[in-house]
Image: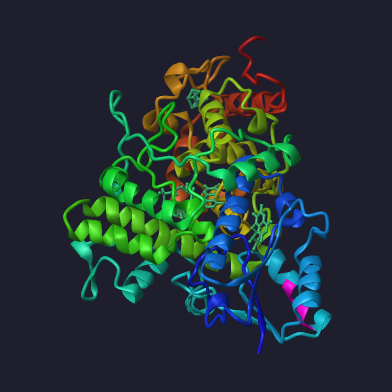
Amino acid sequence: MKSLRLVFGDQLTRTLSALDGLDPVNDVVFMVEVAQETTYAPHHKQKIVLILAAMRHFAAELMGEGVRVHYVRLDDPANTGSFTGELARALGLHKPDAIIATEPGEWRVAQMMGDWSAQFGVPLDVREDDRFFCSRGRFARWANERKSYRMEFFYREMRRETGLLMQGDKPEGGEWNFDKENRKALPARHAPPKRQRFEPDQTTREVMALVARRFADNFGDLEPFGWAVTRADALEALDHFIADCLPLYGDYQDAMKTGEPFVYHSILSPYLNCGLLTAREICIAAERAFRAGHAPLNAVEGFVRQILGWREYVRGIYWRHMPAYEDTNALEAHRPLPAFFWTGDTRMNCIAQAVGDTRKHAYAHHIQRLMITGNFALLAGIEPRAVEEWYLAVYIDAFDWVELPNTHGMVLFADGGMLASKPYAASGAYIDRMSDYCGACAYDVKQKSGPKACPFNPLYWHFLIENRARLAANPRMAMPYRTLDKMSDERRAEITREALAFLDGVDQPKQQFALDL
Ligand code: FAD
Ligand code: DLZ
Ligand code: SF4
């Protein structure tokens, strides 16, 4: 029996279920670079380099083991440009008895695969993606048992099931969550550690030249490119994070600082999402650091929760609710995405910094994504589809299954509260507390109204006014609505006027709030 083993660009894991029982003599591994994938979103240049370079290295490692690999490059003149077209060619060439795959990460790819068996008359065995802690079926069972979802309860079940950070049936340290210790701003003179970057080798340089030629107009800087593209380097990146960053990960998890895009974050999401590292080995390494006394519990629990909790939870929601999930727009947000999301050309320094980091590194950390660009998009009422397209394009770790629920649910509350219990809306005061951005801004974060007032201030209250009918009954929104209700009618009218004036001019270059009027 001869089988064709499919490995997609986000499945670069030697222990992938599609490679289980691989017969190196008869079987053929199928890996293809296709225009369909390089263009379904206008990806950041570094994201295309990461995936294609990591695919080429992974294929070379398999061949080094003596495995037969059918690999098609993007610039191969015979390349049809699609998975289906390339599969047809490979089937004609190798004539396998079966196709073996691991379930794909994305809904659109799963839809495409649905037709293959009938179309080609070859049996297709789609195996579970056991790189995740929680299978789709396990999530469905959890979801079926409750009326509403909350990550925290899902996470506790995952802790119990995996035994991570447990003492018998009790959570390590007696609490499930230590977030109250994890909200510190970075002290002014505190410099986070210098981060390890990886010099591109010949293979990666070839891909960079290809991307420079074919994707010159895509968003983002191509150089310097310092991401790991092999498992060996990704493992080094993991060691570096555990040794140098994990101990203070918790303390400064929410902190933002000019010129410090990574702070103490792991920057492991690109490797996790394309398969160079697995969630299990990362969580085990973090737990080991705690047990060895190298990192405190608030850091390790906070870190493990992101992977064992949030990452698995958003994937569960994605697969349970697609495709209807992406069509909701619970807050009826319809404004277009301002051009400064792409150019960074705005006097709102926090946004200019977040977009600048994104352009340079294809990365911004979670709080920049959630509380700067995300918060702005929420408060300004930007159309969900436009915001989702932006996040999917600009981040090196962006794949629909993880980007969509974060953007649609966590940031925009477009799912009406399925993923998060309340919108993460905040005024400028939060950004000022957690960053050094406001000090260098053209706006004044302390001013609530007038030409110099931080735009996040009127936008925040305007958001509450606009969405009163949808949000006021939410118990977690009671406090801000009480504050809003104590304001005079004149003050509320002033907020609405100023917010709308800002929003109406928001797509102008060098957007400012009446500063030069
Ligand atoms: P760390 O802070 O070091 O966290 C460790 C790991 O936990 C990450 O590598 C990631 O795998 C996981 N993680 C943390 N938060 C989340 C989360 N909310 N959802 C899922 N996994 C999480 N993450 C992606 O991997 N891909 C995306 O496309 C993506 N889009 C996002 C869009 C928005 C609007 C927001 C608010 C968040 C998004 N995230 C996404 C989640 C999170 O911001 C990134 O995972 C994180 O910034 C990656 O950097 P890191 O590896 O340094 O994270
Ligand atoms: C993101 C991406 C890119 C840019 N290019 C490819 C590619 O050429 N070939 C491939 O197999 N995968 C690529 N990927 C990752 C895919 O988009 C991802 O594997 C699918 O979405 C699976 O669901
Ligand atoms: Fe952002 Fe407002 Fe601070 Fe400027 S003042 S950096 S716009 S929060």
Q: Is residue 488 visible?
A: no
Report the span colored magenta: 113-117
Of 211 and 143, which appears nearest the observer?
211
Among the 4 quarters of the image, the one containing residue 245: top left
x 50%, y 44%: residue: 227
Vertical comparison of 136 with 243: above or below: below
Q: Give the farthest residue toward the left.
A: 293
Q: Could you say where residue 267 lies in the image, as x and y percent from the top left? A: 44, 46
Of 206 and 116, which appears nearest the observer?
206
Q: Give the farthest residue toward the top.
A: 516
User: Would residue 377 be counted in the magenta stretch?
Assistant: no
Q: Is residue 197 left or right of residue 102?
A: left
Q: Could you say where residue 266 lies in the image, as x and y percent from the top left? A: 39, 47
Number of disc labels: 0
Q: Is residue 85 left or right of residue 446?
A: right
Q: Is residue 87 left or right of residue 150?
A: right
x 60%, y 57%: residue: 55
Magenta segment's dominant SS is helix
Among the 4 quarters of the image, the one containing residue 163: bottom left
Vertical comparison of 187 with 105: above or below: above
Q: Could you say where residue 234 lies in the image, as x and y percent from the top left? A: 43, 53
